[in-house]
Image: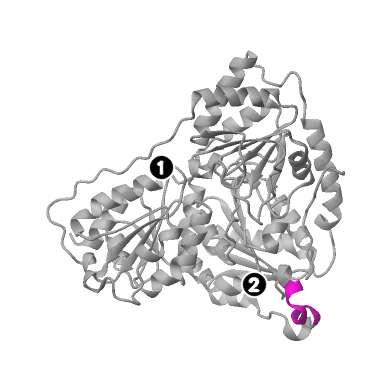
Amino acid sequence: MQGADLIATILKKEGTEFLAVYPAQPMVDAAAKAGIRPIICRQERVGMAIADGFSRITNGKRIGVFAMQQGPGSENSFPGAAQAFSDNTPIMLLPGGEPQEKEFISPNFSPYDNYAHVTKWRAKFNMVERIPELMRRGFYHLRTGKGGPVLLETPRNIWTTEYPGELEYTPATGNKTAPDSVEVTRIAKVLLAAERPMIHAGQGCLYAEAWDELQEIAELLQAPVSTTLPGKSAFPEDHPLALGASAVSHTKQNAYFMSVADVIFAIGTSLTRTTYGIAVPDSPTIIHSTNDSSDINKDYQSDLSLVGDAKLVLQSLIEEIKHQTEGIGHKATRDVAPEVLRLRQEWLADWMPQLESDEVPINQYRIIHDLYDNVDPANTIVTHDAGSPRDQVVPMWKCVAPRTYLGWGKSTQLGFGLGAIMGAKLAEPDKLCINIMGDAAIGMVGMDIETAARNKIGILTIVFNNQIMAIEKTHQPYTAEKMDSLAHTGDYAKVAEGLGAHSEVVTMPDEFVGALERAVKKTKTGQPALLDCKVKAGFDFSKYQGTGY
């Protein structure tokens, strides 16, 4: 078989279900022949996001794959790799490359060279005979340690080179790291001695599928739990110890416990300082556990640390805590839940006027509130776009089951949510999959609604349309002052209808629920739906600082 067919055959053996791709790329026909469904996107960045969202929802157990053509296709795809790299998402990238006789000739674009800083591992097929070896190494890296994109470049001549002999290929299995038992004992003692311990959980708990262990250790220690934005849904937010996710916006209870904790146990997170997440205070004792040693003492000085898979770390700590307390932990000596409940109720009381607002244009928080009350949160996957939609949705959406939310946030490219939610729907076709985006974001990627329509990916897009980039309006004084003449214009419902989606315009608060019901019904047939919601130009975020409540 030729190189392209060889790669497709190996992808099939590795469990690849679909190939996100933008033509012209030899992998389109090769994938179809191998029984892999090609999903042809309208632009490469969205295709990358489809693969990204798929890998996130499956916890990397099923790997999203994206293939792009040489030259401009690889250039256009770069932002998607940067997004996946910043959020540690395991995706396989298969760019085409210049034929080998044109290597080292400028300005030909080399994916292998130019993606060096946004990939976990990369290689180039210099011989067709090496394709099985390098593919297996690539999948091993995808399944071991911290996630990230893996890139395998195929020079043009390799696509059509015949592979000698029969393919013998065994799919790669990854490895997990167990923690140092001596450090587990030390850390268990520190956690048990703490007066006000707090757990800060990241997406490593999702990839490790450690949600049961996370809940058990929280209850043993009576330690409230916050999550990072990518880690949102790792801990059930209807649990008495849940504080919610920490992003630009966050809950009152999250900020309070973060400020008074004497020990913060960060598990499954890189503890990266970012403008898109709440800062962990430097003053308490910090215990940092991650599966990548390069994250330890990177942005925060850690007093104690553990390197290992989040599930294995938590299992070891739970066993040691039970050993040191005869199975009791702090359950008999401490009850934090009433304090969490009091702060949660105070916070919700502050926000209820906006959540139930009848104002016109519509208050975005009213839409979020009505949306939550009229879907099944345990069987719904929600994501957001960057900017105002993210900061309005994150604290208000209560996740009650793992991987019902796609939080992302060290790189915040406008438009990522549309592709990500398509990937989520491909991974979980029976769940309602919703992307909430602003009018700025849909202007960047809206044409790929047609990708969802053509491929019968029944997603729901909700546009917060205030005809201005709300979070950026202070930087646009002319736009802010002259809304009538310089507003962002466009009928997104008509655009979506023209691209094959069901669409409606929502102008009044009491119209939303009915429009939602009709849209959800359409998504169940495989048709994407879009609700163009006319919302207020202003924005408010849930931000709390310090301990003065």
**Which of the pair 77/1 is nearer the observer?**
77
Question: Which residue is at the far left?
Answer: 165
**Which of the pair 173/466 is nearer the observer?**
173
Image vertical order of residue 516 relative to residue 74, above or below: above
Image vertical order of residue 404 relative to residue 365, above or below: above
Determine crowd level at label 1: few under 14, some 14-19, many 20+ residues with C-alpha closer than 10 A: some
Name the image colouring: one colour
Circle on res. 440? 2
The residue where tag 1 is placed is 144
Q: Main secondary structure of the magenta part?
A: helix
Which of the 4 image quarters holds residue 322? top right
Q: Position of residue 56 (x, y in %)?
A: 50, 50
Q: Secondary structure at mark 1?
A: loop
Determine crowd level at label 2: few under 14, some 14-19, many 20+ residues with C-alpha closer than 10 A: many
Q: Position of residue 3 (x, y in %)?
A: 22, 61
Circle on res. 297? none
Numbered-mark total: 2
**Which of the pair 185/90 is nearer the observer?**
185
Observer able to see residue 263: yes
Q: Does the segment drawn in magenta span residue 212?
A: no
Magenta segment boundaries in residue numbering:
473-481
Asked if residue 272 lies left or right of residue 30, the reply is: right
Question: Which residue is at the far bottom?
Answer: 485
Q: Residue at x 63, y 62 (%)?
A: 386
The N terminus sits in image quarter = bottom left
